Image (tube, rainbow, N blue to C red):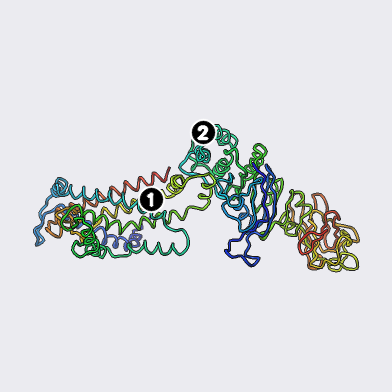
Amino acid sequence: MYKQVNQKAWLLVLPVVVLVAFNAIIPLMTVVNYSVQETFGDNVFFWAGVDWFQQILNSPRFHDALLRQLLFSAIILAIEVPLGLIIALAMPRKGIGVSICLILMALPLLIPWNVVGAMWNIFALPEIGLLGKGLNNLGFDYNYTRQPVTAWFTTVLMDVWHWTSLVVLLCYAGLVSIPDDYYRAAKIDGASAWAVFRYIQLPKLKRVLTIAVLLRFMDSFMIYTEVKVLTGGGPGNATTFLSIDLDKMALGQFDLGPAAAMSLIYFLIILLLSWLFYTLMMRNEAQ
Amino acid sequence: MARITIDRLRHSYVSQPGKPEDWALKEMSLEWEDGGAYALLGPSGCGKTTLLNLISGLLRPTEGRILFDERDVSSVSPEERNIAQVFQFPVIYDTMTVYDNLAFPLRNRGVAPSEIDRRVREIGEMLDLGGSLTNRASGLTADGKQKISLGRGLVRSDVNVIMFDEPLTVIDPHLKWVLRSKLKELHHRVRRTMIYVTHDQTEALTFADKVVVMNNGEVVQVGTPIELFERPAHTFVGHFIGSPGMNVLPVALENGGISFMGSRIDAIEAARVDAAGGGRLELGVRPEFVSFAGTGGLPVEIGKVTDAGRFRIVEARHQDHLIRVLVPEGQEVPTGSAALGFEPTHTHLYRDGWLVA
């Protein structure tokens, strides 16, 4: 018996291959193409090998942006996850309050990202914004367009406002799925409110919290629109995160080669961290 | 350790109960002796879980009192009532070991570590969990988890009552039997009051010394398994307990006797019934106490015969009424037409559902 070679099957997967090719592989390969060549326009390319990669990996500018990015993600995780959990715990479990809270919580998530940036930009302006003017009237020297510290403060505050809701909604969904019997048993066992949190709620929320941390980390690591509109990466380079830096390099300076190399490095960092989170999550599942 | 008295208790989930349907639990008074094994038996939605939650303190009664010995505990928290409860789905603390799970209620009450260790090991041994005390509780099977739930009640030496809310629902059939006998054995060892809520008559009758049968929010009968079988106080008990359930036939007082569709039934003397009572009269007799009589019995047509191993269930018809007969192994079943006789001591008369004679 000979195995029938049937190449017609390829026709059936062709539509998917074309789709994936156009939205992922071709753009990605274009970037790879740019990252190993030098161009001065007019479609003239010179081979550059791994030069751009070496240049990016050794540049203090990239290191600084990466450090800022990591610091930003760490700060917002440290604030949004506990805060989201606390809000979810405090939310009502029945009655009209549930709908009101859920709608209030969902609102920031529904606002387009550039609108969030624009809102906070105006809200925090020291001369006319409610927040900026208010803080200055209270005696704080606040001007996010000139002071790096207040620029960071405003950026973090904006992200907390925008994204804590996501953690709240995830935690709330996790909390309401805990059966009543657990609380009853804890009452009968004489457990304190802290013990209920520590031994019932927290273990039952482990899965949603892992997802919340994962999502918030990934999203904050790729933050672009809101910061671009709010501070544009300034003052100076104070809030120039990786994506903003990439944007400056590619569209500000038109350094296509280094920008492409940086894109790939950025992409690989995200891929690596995603894989790391995923494996950790799966290992927890297996236990 | 206490005698539990339920004094004219009523409960409603509606804030302003008016209509009789508003009451999830109709007025009832009961006594539970210290150390007894009780079962609360009834169909789903009959109010048995409500009663259980009232005793445990998870609910406050709308009316009436609950006394532990002489103390009124109607508005006391579950923790202060010092009760234990095993729920339908096993409740365990996932992140703790079996040992820590069992120690948890004692630690919350500030018991000395040496005493905790002694109690936990003793109870672990009693529940056959001795070998897995250091394991994570989340890794256990459903029956192991349910044992932990029970163990958390048993470790507290001063618990007033241990309550079970359909605890075998999620247990595999072959393990149900094992756990049921384990429970019975434990009751003999510790002699705590135990209240077992179930809709399964086998579970109730094998576990309890006394069974409280509930229907539609009221207690219809309290009795030993034998009393429930031999003298059902209500036709509901007759239906609900026994397999197959009691035959209930509409009867009337005619010419100084009891007659069923025009046929005289001699098993019940009409003199035992107050003729002026009125109401709907019914005769109840279990299939176990119906037999084939010679002439003079109730004429019937024999229908379907089902073999149930040690006996056969015969469906006999008199006009449009079905009467089930239990025929022991080895006894012959007639075909076609036959006559039935009812055993007089086990034939009862009911008025509007309630036993009168």
Q: Secondary structure at mark 2?
A: loop
**Closer to the camera in the image, A125 or A116:** A125
Judging from the image, mark 2 belongs to the subunit labelled B
Residue B220: % across, % down = 72, 57
The residue mark sitting in front, 2 or 1, is 2
Tell me the residue that label 1 is attached to. Answer: A209
Residue at the spot x=33%, y=56% of the render? Answer: A164
Residue B288, percent across and down? 79, 53
Residue type highlighted by circle 1: Leu
Q: Is residue B247 left or right of residue B56?
A: right
Question: Could you tell me which quadrant the C terminus of chain B lies in?
Answer: bottom right
> From the image, which quarter does the N terminus of chain B lie in?
top right
Q: CA distance from mark 2 to mark 1?
A: 36 Å
Q: Nearer the viewer, residue B209 or A57?
A: B209
Secondary structure under badge 1?
A: helix
- Same subunit, labels 2 and 1: the answer reads no
Percent x, y of residue B261 = 84, 68
Q: Quadrant of residue B322?
A: bottom right
User: Mark 2–mark 1 contact, CB under 8 Å?
Assistant: no
Q: Which mark is residue B97?
A: none
Which residue does the numbered mark 2 point to in the structure image? B112
Q: Indicate the position of residue A66 as horizontal and vertical percent values.
A: 21, 49
Q: Amino acid at mark 2?
A: Ala
In the image, A264: left or right of A15? Answer: left
The mark tally for this picture is: 2
Q: Residues within 10 Å of mark 2 (few under 14, many from 20)?
A: few
Left or right of B191, for residue B292: right
Q: In this orientation, which residue lies closer to the viewer: B135 or B27?
A: B27
Return the chain for callout 1.
A
Name the side, left or right, on which A212 lies relative to A199: left
At label 1, counting other C-alpha atoms closer than 10 Å, the crowd grade (few under 14, some 14-19, many 20 or more) is: many
